[in-house]
Image (cartoon, rainbow, N blue to C red):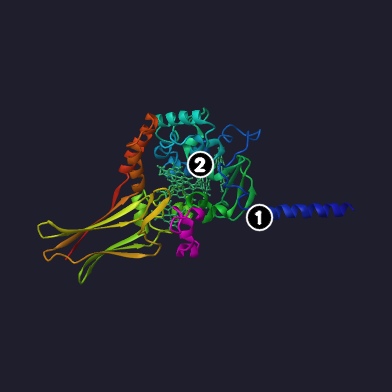
């Protein structure tokens, strides 16, 4: 009899061991918005472990903090968004925070707290304080936008990928915050979907405004399993670089100038972009060509645009979609060339916030509270500074 009990005990232990190696995945409701971290922290935790501010995580996870703080995720509680809030009221504003600052702790409880937060945000231009004394309450957590805990913490439990170089999944022990749950869900593209893929029910001309996961699934990158993380978090670095980063965009494209019988062309190939270039409706890429004579005088010019343009007029409408799909080659041909042409000058300009530049201009021309105006002005200045020259080259005839 005694032996049987021991055997049963061994069986249970065996099952537990097996459970630790079965990938639990993300718990159901992980991406419920707003995502909850439940009540007060476990009693024996230190103040540091119980602090959800990114600066606190950064005390032990320095590399992730240093990369993340310069990413747009850290700045998602942005002036261009919150400047629109006074006209919306806190409840609608919380609908925006559902992606830009999704934790329950980050939502506004009422209009007063929203106004207070907007005032604080004017004083502290960045969403978090690098020099913060983490023992004192710093800025409200919502100012940290898409913060560490938004992706990694639910109900005080930390979740993360299997430790580097291994494949262990399930609950793993660690020297802090009661260990963590490891799941390969962190390594899959679907992890980014809840904020970067809008539902098909909101499609315009068959495509949601942000359709990144679907574009990826239909690409050779999706087929080969080259994930969002492999490109946007190389070696697990929390960089999240995108269209606002010239080096990232250059890495994604191949650009060559070619001579043809009847003119010249610039050939743009999307070689390392796992979705449409660009994936969102807000950036615009402008390709310009100028035919010059020997004295450098412009004889003729050409202009093309790459992007998906939408407009809102009692519902969204798509005006055009000239984006490059993954792997696509596109020629921008300057032809016919005037007889005296000796060189053609090609330039590519990226306007990452083209759509928002228009939104801010329209908002500033209408009535708004002075607080809202201060934020939108700041957003407009920032959006204008984001434009950059991606390519500048000549081809001689
Ligand atoms: C007191 C130090 C400390 C603090 C503070 C801390 N962590 Fe950790 N964390 C650790 C240690 C130690 C481990 C286990 C070893 C490792 O992966 O570094 C760990 C593991 C993790 C993992 C799992 C890593 C993997 O391999 O999957 C994640 C995710 C994580 N922490 C997130 C956070 C977040 C988010 C915060 C802030 C809300 C935080 N941690 C605060 C010490 C800390
Ligand atoms: C909780 C919601 C959320 C999740 C999850 C999320 N993102 Fe984001 N992401 C955002 C928001 C909001 C922005 C815009 C920030 C801003 O500029 O205000 C953004 C911005 C970005 C940008 C910068 C875009 C640009 O314009 O240059 C990249 C790249 C990016 N995310 C990649 C990812 C990847 C890869 C994942 C998955 C590993 C991911 N994101 C998961 C909400 C999220
Ligand atoms: C489903 C998730 C989601 C929701 C909800 C959402 N956004 Fe965003 N928003 C994003 C993502 C993702 C980006 C970055 C897109 C990119 O660069 O590809 C973004 C970018 C922005 C930007 C430009 C970058 C910046 O922060 O200045 C503004 C402004 C903005 N959103 C405002 C809003 C407002 C206002 C609302 C509510 C009416 C809202 N968003 C709701 C996901 C969301
Ligand atoms: C937008 C979601 C997102 C945000 C925000 C985010 N992470 Fe991560 N983190 C991930 C993903 C996804 C991975 C796994 C990447 C992979 O496997 O390629 C990861 C991996 C990690 C790991 C394991 C690293 C390793 O080398 O094994 C740690 C630790 C971690 N994150 C901590 C943090 C901390 C601390 C912050 C804030 C400073 C943070 N994360 C912000 C999504 C995020
Ligand atoms: C093969 C590499 C690669 C993969 C895979 C990839 N991206 Fe990108 N991504 C890029 C490059 C390069 C850029 C810069 C060019 C651009 O904006 O399209 C970019 C830009 C972005 C941007 C900036 C906004 C915009 O309008 O372009 C977001 C957001 C983004 N990626 C999210 C994702 C998400 C989410 C996934 C997974 C579903 C993903 N990316 C998969 C390489 C990749």
Residue 227 seen in render: no
Where is residue 176 drawn, in percent x and y? 60, 40
Query: Do the CB atoms of the residues marked 1 and 2 lie less than 8 Å apart?
Result: no
Where is residue 262 drawn, in percent x and y? 20, 70
376 is within the stretch colored magenta: no
User: Which quadrant holds the C terminus?
Assistant: bottom left
Query: Hey, which residue is sitting farthest left in the picture?
Result: 295
The residue identified by callout 1 is: 21
Indicate left or right for 35 with 355 as reference. Answer: right
The residue identified by callout 2 is: 95
Near-viewer residue (233 or 257): 257
Q: Which residues are magenta?
A: 199-225
The local crowd at label 1, few if under 14, some if 14 to 19, many if 20 or more residues have their Cα within 10 Å, is: some
Q: How many marks?
A: 2
Where is residue 329 drawn, in percent x and y? 34, 65
206 is within the stretch colored magenta: yes
At numbered mark 1, what does the secondary structure look like: helix, strand or loop? helix
């Amino acid at each position: 009899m005694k032996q049987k009990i021991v055997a049963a005990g061994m069986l249970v232990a065996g099952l537990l061991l097996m459970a630790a190696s079965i990938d639990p995945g993300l718990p159901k409701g992980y991406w419920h918005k707003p995502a909850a971290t439940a009540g007060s922290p476990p009693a024996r935790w230190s103040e540091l472990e119980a602090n959800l501010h990114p600066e606190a995580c950064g005390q032990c996870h320095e590399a992730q903090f240093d990369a993340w703080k310069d990413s747009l995720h850290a700045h998602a509680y942005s002036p261009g968004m919150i400047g629109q809030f006074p006209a919306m009221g806190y409840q609608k504003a919380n609908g925006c925070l559902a992606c830009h600052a999704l934790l329950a702790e980050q939502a506004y409880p009422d209009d007063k707290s929203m106004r207070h937060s907007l005032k604080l945000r004017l004083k502290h231009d960045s969403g978090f304080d690098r020099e913060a004394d983490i023992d004192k309450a710093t800025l409200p957590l919502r100012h940290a936008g898409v913060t560490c805990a938004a992706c990694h913490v639910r109900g005080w439990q930390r979740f993360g990928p299997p430790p580097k170089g291994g494949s262990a999944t399930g609950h793993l022990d660690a020297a802090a915050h009661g260990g963590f749950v490891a799941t390969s869900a962190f390594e899959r593209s679907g992890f980014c979907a809840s904020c970067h893929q809008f539902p098909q029910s909101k499609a315009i001309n068959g495509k949601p405004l942000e359709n990144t996961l679907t574009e990826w699934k239909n690409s050779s990158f999706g087929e080969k399993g080259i994930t969002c993380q492999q490109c946007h978090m190389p070696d697990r670095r929390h960089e999240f670089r995108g269209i606002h980063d010239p080096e990232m965009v250059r890495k994604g494209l191949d650009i060559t100038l070619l001579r043809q019988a009847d003119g010249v062309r610039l050939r743009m190939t999307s070689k390392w972009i796992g979705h449409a270039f660009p994936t969102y409706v807000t950036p615009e890429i402008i390709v310009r060509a100028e035919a010059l004579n020997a004295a450098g005088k412009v004889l003729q010019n050409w202009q093309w645009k790459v992007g998906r343009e939408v407009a809102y007029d009692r519902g969204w409408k798509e005006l055009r979609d000239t984006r490059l799909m993954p792997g696509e080659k596109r020629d921008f041909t300057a032809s016919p060339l005037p007889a005296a042409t000796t060189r053609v000058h090609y330039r590519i300009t990226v306007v990452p916030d083209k759509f928002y530049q228009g939104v801010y201009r329209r908002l500033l021309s209408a009535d708004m509270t002075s607080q809202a105006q201060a934020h939108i002005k700041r957003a407009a200045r920032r959006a204008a500074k984001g434009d950059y020259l991606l390519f500048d080259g000549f081809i001689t005839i």
